[in-house]
Image (spheres, rainbow, N blue to C red):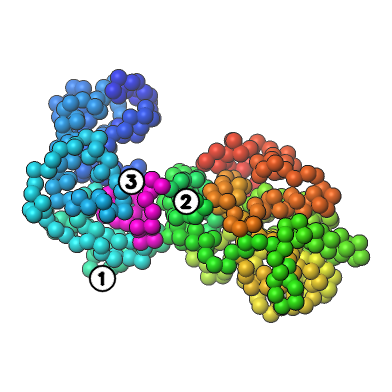
Amino acid sequence: MPTLEIDGQRITVEDGVNLIEAAERLGIEIPHYCYHPGLTVAGNCRMCLVEIEKMPKLQIACNTRATEGMVIRTQSDRVKEVRAAVLEFLLINHPIDCPICDQAGECKLQDYYMDYDRQESRFALEDKVHKEKALDIGPLIMLDQERCILCTRCVRFLDEVTKTSELGVFERGNHCAIDLFPGRRLDNHYSGNVADICPVGALTNKDFRFRARVWYLERTPSVCATCATGCNIDIHHRRGEMYRFRPRHNPDVNQYWMCDEGRLSYQRYQGEGRLLQPVSREGDRWAVRGWDDARVEVVERIRAAIAAHGPNAVAAVISAQATNEEVFLADRLFRGHLQARVAALSWSPADALHDDFLIDADKNPNSAGLRLLASDAGLDAVIAAARSGAIRVLALLRSDLLGPCGESLLDALADSVEFVVALDTHFSRTAEIADVLLPIGSFAETDGTFINRSRRVQRVREAIPPPGQARPGWQVLSELRRDLGGPAVPADASAVFTELAASHASFRHLSYARLGDAGLALEGAPSR
């Protein structure tokens, strides 16, 4: 492990670490465009040149490994002079359309100009080489060739990560430009990542363009709920509205990337159909209820069914869309406290999109947690009991039965079960058979944890509050448990997790504080 000195500070790093990474660990930023830690080194932007003692020429930090005894200077006059020269070169033909460029706030060309250049251009505006602007190159991506500085991050991503190679560098000299290969479109399942890694405004995301300035957005670390992979993401939001999901680096889960399906999944939680207040069925219409009234009705129907027909007259279906905290509380309430039947639902379409990288065929974020924390009487057995009339009260937690059961079976359940209560985020075909609907928050509107396909426990956080009168699922379940004779409502989701950890050996070494932003692997849990 070499020890070196950077700007007067000594550091010891692992073998193979380059100077950009070594400097970052000291809190020193070496400016760069073409270098990305998830891609091969190109060394073409020359912005990361640094001075190394005993070397006559400046060296690029991205392709120079830290070695024993190195003495590096990143802020000398010689280095700053070169950086200004590199920026002047990169800006010769740049359109300087910063006021209208939607990369403002995230543009490294803009940032570094302010840090290292700040000189008037010696190149006349009318002499700039003009290239294509606002090219629609794929379902998700727009290309502005004039803004491109040819760092080739996008080309390397498509060559090395997706291996689809839609983009290349064409022409020569001043007319050099990134473009699609003839007959191609940038239309792979990970296309949105090229906008994330573009250091300037050349590649932008259609979904986010012109919707918000980034300096107005807040960022909350969370986990994608689109499939069992559990890609780490940042939720960008403002005033209770989500604007985008972007991948967050986690070398044990998703590296630096995420799929387009997960990237756009925030839209489904903000569209029409959200449950905004408790409602109950009155004839052919839904009547708005207060939370206390709706909960009292649910509790009374459960108590009445058990008093008249025993605990087997009540059943709950818990889906793998629920957090561990929700699964734990629901299982404790129905199986533990009421001694009712519980069925675990982890369903995905037979033709669900999947690959050998990040996209999993299991379209549930917490199938592993459901298997670990919920008892399972079997969905088929519970449905059969319900159809026979043996089940008088059926509770559904984030459980859409349309996929696994079909419409005709849903209608049969509506006829055979006396009372159905659904805790969910949206109106759905399944919600139509319910007698009471209790609105709960999505994964982006509640605190909790999921266990991904690699048995890693990861945090989701409340980025925005649940809309309308919706409440976090753990809170609604805790209130039902209290009303049915259980303990008091926990103060927050962390308290629920503490209770969970005390009850299950696999979780005893875990807490929200220990999980942090990256999560931790579960010990002793069964594999999928």
As helix, strand or loop, the secondary structure at mark 3 comes to loop
Disc 2 residue type (three-letter): His
Q: Nearer the viewer, residue 1 or 35?
A: 35
Above or below for 51 versus 130: above
Q: Determine the residue positioned at 18% across, 53% down.
A: 95
Which corner quadrant of the image does residue 71 belong to? top left
Q: CA distance from mark 3 to mark 1?
A: 34 Å
Q: Nearer the viewer, residue 191 or 353?
A: 191
Circle nearer the viewer, 2 or 1: 2
Q: Please name the residue that numbered disc 2 is placed on.
A: 237
Disc 1 residue type (three-letter): Gly
As helix, strand or loop, the secondary structure at mark 2 comes to strand
For disc 3, the neighbor class at 10 Å (few under 14, some 14 to 19, many from 20) is: some
Disc 2 or 3, which lies upstream in sequence?
3
Q: Is residue 265 left or right of residue 60?
A: right
Disc 3 residue type (three-letter): Gly
Q: Determine the residue positioned at 53% across, 48% down.
A: 463
Q: Please name the residue that numbered disc 3 is placed on.
A: 105
Task: Give the farthest residue toward the right.
Answer: 308
Task: Give the farthest residue toward the bottom.
Answer: 408
The part of the chain drawn in magenta is 192-216
As helix, strand or loop, the secondary structure at mark 1 comes to loop
Whether 210 is among the magenta residues is yes
Q: Nearer the viewer, residue 76 or 236?
A: 236
Residue 183 numbered mark, or none:
1
Where's the C terminus, which quadrant? bottom right
